[in-house]
Image: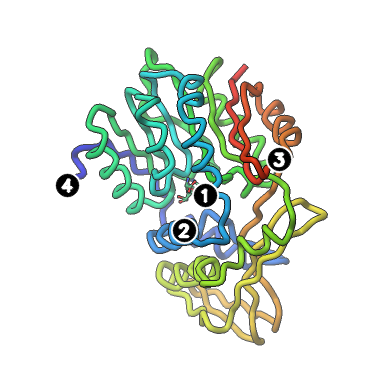
Amino acid sequence: MSDMAIHFYDLHPPTADLKQEVLQGLTRQPRRLSPKLFYDRRGSELFEAITHTPEYYPTRTELGLFERYGSEMAKLLGRDGLLVELGSGSSRKIRLLLDALRPAAYMPVDISRDFLLDAANELAAEFPAIAVHALCADYSRGLELPWCPEELPRAAFFPGSSIGNFEPAEARQLLGHVARALGPGGQLLIGVDLQKDPDVLNAAYNDGEGLTAAFNLNLLARINRELQADFVLDAFHHHAFYNGAEGRMEMHLISAKSQWVEVAGSHFQFATGEGIHTENSYKYTIEGFHKLAAAAGFVPVQVWTDKDDLFSVHCLRVV
Ligand SMILES: C[S@@+](CC[C@H](N)C(=O)[O-])C[C@H]1O[C@@H](n2cnc3c(N)ncnc32)[C@H](O)[C@@H]1O
């Protein structure tokens, strides 16, 4: 199917930005790379594979909430508007809501360009009545909607607990960008992972098939591919653990030996056991998330949780 079926707005960050972020992140102590850098096509494919592992409870639990409460959620969001999805990935979850929601237009926003294009084209073919306006952009830099007719009411969808990848102050800022893009009265449906037994969390980020490890290591492979770097993937290993003091899962890549790595002409020395911090995933309580949302200009409308209180989906309204 041709890309002409959708409207596509390409604000993918240029390679120069990737280079600057990677060089800065590797120079910091402790070394730090943003989880948004995981997502080239391969990273998106690996993330999809993780969502099917038995250990990764968030996707199946959130999907269960959409299956059970989807029509209630859709009623609150309202029909015939512009529905913006942040970090849409495969757009698998929104499919459960589209029949009930019937938006006039759907705008998936994702940083992973090729994956976004494929997903948006597939969705446009499946739902020909919905105008698909796909936006490839980094939402952590703000959220300017390239297409938003005044007459269409706006709603946003932000599943997968991707909000947990941000430090609380950054999360507040991002939700503030979403609130401004929606305008007063705009509604946000957002998936938020809940605090729980650390054993369940540790298992989810250390699946038996090693897909999360492959996903984490793909960041180094991507840097090799795009920035002429020479990371030896076997010389690093995946390390994920629950940090109880901070209330978050952390992912790191740990150097298995003393080594030098060249990235875009710069050289970095790693000691044995030295890490690169690649992801945080904050876990919230319902009350804690409501506080964060309030600070960003939202009031809670409704919250849904599963029977084991693993995951929550919130409907929030911009005041
Ligand atoms: C954890 S995955 C979630 C995918 C899907 N929404 C789900 O719930 O299964 C995060 C998604 O957000 C996208 N993403 C991550 N950081 C982003 C950023 N800063 N700007 C835009 N998209 C981003 C990734 O490409 C990926 O598709």
Quickly name the residue at label 3. Answer: 169
**Image vertical order of residue 93 relative to residue 201, above or below:** above
Q: Nearer the viewer, residue 118 or 16?
A: 118
Q: Position of residue 24 (x, y in %)?
A: 60, 62
Question: Of callouts 4 and 1, which one flags the residue occurring earlier in the amino acid sequence?
Answer: 4
In the rendered structure, which amino acid carries the disc numbered 1?
Answer: Thr
Q: Which mark is residue 1?
A: 4
The image quadrant of residue 172 is top right
User: Which one is in front in this view, the residue at disc 4 or the one at disc 2?
Assistant: 2
Pointer 3: residues within 10 angstroms few (<14), some, or many (20+)? few
Question: Of callouts 3 and 4, which one flags the residue occurring earlier in the amino acid sequence?
Answer: 4
In the rendered structure, which amino acid carries the disc numbered 3?
Answer: Ala
Mark 3 and mark 4: Cα distance apart in space: 42 Å
Residue beneath the point at 28% across and 28% down: 130
Mark 4 and mark 1: Cα distance apart in space: 28 Å
Quickly name the residue at label 1. Answer: 59
Q: Which mark is residue 76?
A: none
In this rendering, position of residue 297 left or right of residue 101: right
Q: Position of residue 234 (x, y in %)?
A: 53, 83
Respond yes or no on whether mark 4 lies under 8 Å from ligand 1.
no
Question: Of callouts 1 and 3, which one flags the residue occurring earlier in the amino acid sequence?
Answer: 1
In the rendered structure, which amino acid carries the disc numbered 2?
Answer: His
